Every structure is written in C-alpha cells, then in structure tokens.
Image (cartoon, helix red, strand yellow):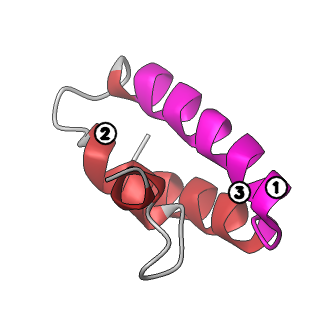
Amino acid sequence: MTRKDFQLIADVLKASSTTPMERCVIEQLALTFATELAKTNANFNQQRFVKACFAPGRDPSEERK
C-alpha cells in the first residue's frame, strides 16, 4: 500500500468521527488499522496515521493528557 492509500483510510475515519461516542470507536479503529498497516510497510508511521484520523485539535492521545 502507498501513502495515498493510508491517507484515504485516515480521511474516511476522520469524516466518521462527529460525536464523542463515534470518536471513541474511531480511535479504536485507527489504532487497530495503524497496527495492521505497519505490518505492510516498514516506513509506516503509526502515530502520524492516528493523528491523521482526527481533525486538528482532536487527537485522542492529546485529550488524555
């Protein structure tokens, strides 16, 4: 898979996370996707992918701090 494919997946997840409950589900999906996509590409950046799944200022890892 290419960066373009990874971005498409992140964009779909981002568009789906509009309510707090959906963001919780999307966070889990994003983490699962990140783990599995990392297995397909040695240069895949899991943290960057998860951030791309959320609108600016909506990164779930930042909300937990």
Front residue of this view, candidates 19 and 26: 19
Q: Residues within 10 Å of mark 1 (few under 14, many from 20)?
A: few
Q: Would you name the residue on which mark 1 appears?
A: 22
Q: Real-space Cα distance between discs 1 and 2?
A: 20 Å
Q: Which residues are magenta?
A: 16-37
Q: Amino acid at mark 2?
A: Gln
22 sits to left or right of 46: right
Q: Residue 12: horizontal and vertical position, in percent?
A: 71, 63
Q: Residues within 10 Å of mark 3 (few under 14, many from 20)?
A: many
Location of the N terminus by quadrant is top left
Q: Residue 19: horizontal and vertical position, in percent?
A: 83, 68
Q: Secondary structure at mark 3?
A: helix
Q: Nearer the viewer, mark 2 or mark 3?
A: 3
26 sits to left or right of 35: right
Q: Real-space Cα distance between discs 1 and 3?
A: 4 Å
Q: Where on the picture, by quarter, is residue 63?
A: bottom left
Q: Secondary structure at mark 2?
A: helix
Q: Residue 56: horizontal and vertical position, in percent?
A: 43, 82
Return the disc, 2 or 3, that comes first in the chain's sequence. 3
Q: Would you name the residue on which mark 2 appears?
A: 46
Q: Amino acid at mark 1?
A: Glu
Q: Nearer the viewer, mark 1 or mark 2?
A: 1
Residue at screen point 53% across, 61% down: 53
Q: Would you name the residue on which mark 3 appears?
A: 23
Residue at screen point 53% across, 78% down: 55
CB contact under 8 Å: marks 1 and 3: yes
